[in-house]
Amino acid sequence: MSRVLKNANVCDDESARYGSFARQGPNENSDYLDHEIAQLTKLRSVPSEFLSRNIPGRLRIPVSTVKMLVGREGNYSGRGRFSTADSCHVLSRYLPVNGPWRVDRMKSRAYVSQFSDDGTLFVAGFQGSHIRIYNVDKGWKVQKDILAKSLRWTITDTCLSPDQRYLVYASMSPVVHIVNVGSSATESLANVTEIHDGLDFSWNEEDDDDEFGIFSVKFSRDGRELVAGSGDDAIYVYDLEANKNILRIHAHQSDVNTVCFADDTGHIIYSGSDDSVCKVWDRRCFTGRGQAAGILIGHLEGITFIDSRGDGRYLISNGKDQTTKLWDIRKMSSNAARTPILRDTDWDYRWMEYPPQARTLKHPCDQSLATYRGHSVLRTLIRCYFSPEYSTGQKYIYSGSSDCSVYIYDLVTGAQVARLDYHEGAVRDCSWHPVYPMIISSSWDGVIAKWEFPGNGEAPAPPRRRSIRRWDFY
């Protein structure tokens, strides 16, 4: 494979020291992640010594659910109940790997899916203009069937407002639509049965609608703003109360595939792009047109998705270099130069396999804390997430995969703890229930599938087989 090292000045003196890309093993953090986040994860998910070991008459009893229950009933901790960490330890041991059971099947590809913050609703968006909202507590009944307005190519992203009253959906257009999902109507046909208001992200009247599309859109925690990443290399912030754009940043050198708020304050924004760089933006520190607070270098190819841990410090990203990376923004660089790009000049992730020679390469200036390997990020913008804080203490990360599976990794050890195989098409998105041990996978085969522990005892239904066209992407 022909390797090209571009923009050799990206890492100050580091590139001169290494001269080329370092080699790495299949999972360079396979032993242990020695970092503050490892201790934070332990505090959230490791049981107290009283419940796990100090049962009278026994020394150093292994941690088990039964013995923890005995310790709780005997009140050996003195609290009379499980702590949050105790509960997370118990719940996180029972991974949602049983099943799957089919929730729904559509005639077009599933592109995006998400649980609401409280887990009562589930949203799935399909290429064929449909967005379905399911009521989880009522047997996955379709609560709202939305037919998207002015769809271009596919539903690229959806997001529920924090109060679960509104849904925004985006496509390959600068206009994002918002619909009231709290209304009584089940069928929502744009501007016929319900109004789907258009939020125009074009920055000025000279912008051509064909110039860019929205790849990623997210509500702020207070529900007053939207942040969006676009195909014109920019980040936008839209004020819903003022009904207008209030910020446009020319953020990257290529498509901005993913954006999100770092925490509840809405001050800090993370972005990831096809230029292979993650950037951190602090809206309190903008001068003039705005500069990134810092950049995170380590991916060798474009970034498909970012998920924040919610603490304004840690995030994970999926990359077209077939890795998920964990980051601490305190290690970010102020150097705004682009990262080197390593690729066969003819390689295109949309229809080609990743070059085998590149799988063990490491960026010489990699700033990430850990790298997770096993899943594949090809053909579409595969998404990855932290597992829920309430039930797992964010002990795991998980990702869809173009090889039709869902992968779950231990955050600290990097070990692959589960692989969920069922679909006949790429799993572009997946979502872990915020409370229960349940994962929903959504695939290009049109199937929405449910994985649980322990499961409901039913035999899994076979997926609907369909071909994947090589020219379909994003």
Image (cartoon, rainbow, N blue to C red):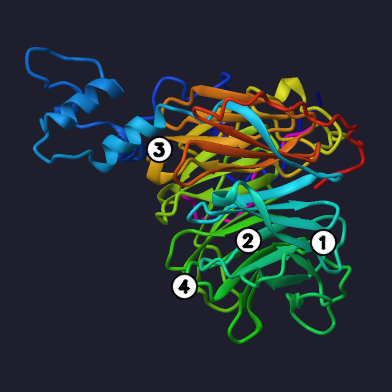
Earlier in the chain: of badge 4 and badge 2, it is 2
Q: Which residues are magenta?
A: 332-343
| Mark 4 closeness class: few <14, some 14–19, many ≥20 residues within 10 Å | few
Dots 3, 2 in contact, CB < 8 A: no
Q: Secondary structure at mark 1?
A: loop
Q: Please tell me whether mark 4 or mark 1 is closer to you in this view.
A: 1
Q: Nearer the viewer, residue 5 or 316?
A: 316
Name the residue: 27% across, 35% down. 86
Q: Please tell me whether mark 3 or mark 4 is closer to you in this view.
A: 3
Name the residue: 78% across, 70% down. 174
Q: Amino acid at mark 3?
A: Thr
Q: Amino acid at mark 4?
A: Cys
Q: Secondary structure at mark 4?
A: helix
| Image disc number at residue 285 | 4
| Image disc number at residue 172 | 1
- Which residue is denoted by mark 3 in the rendering? 392
Earlier in the chain: of badge 4 and badge 1, it is 1
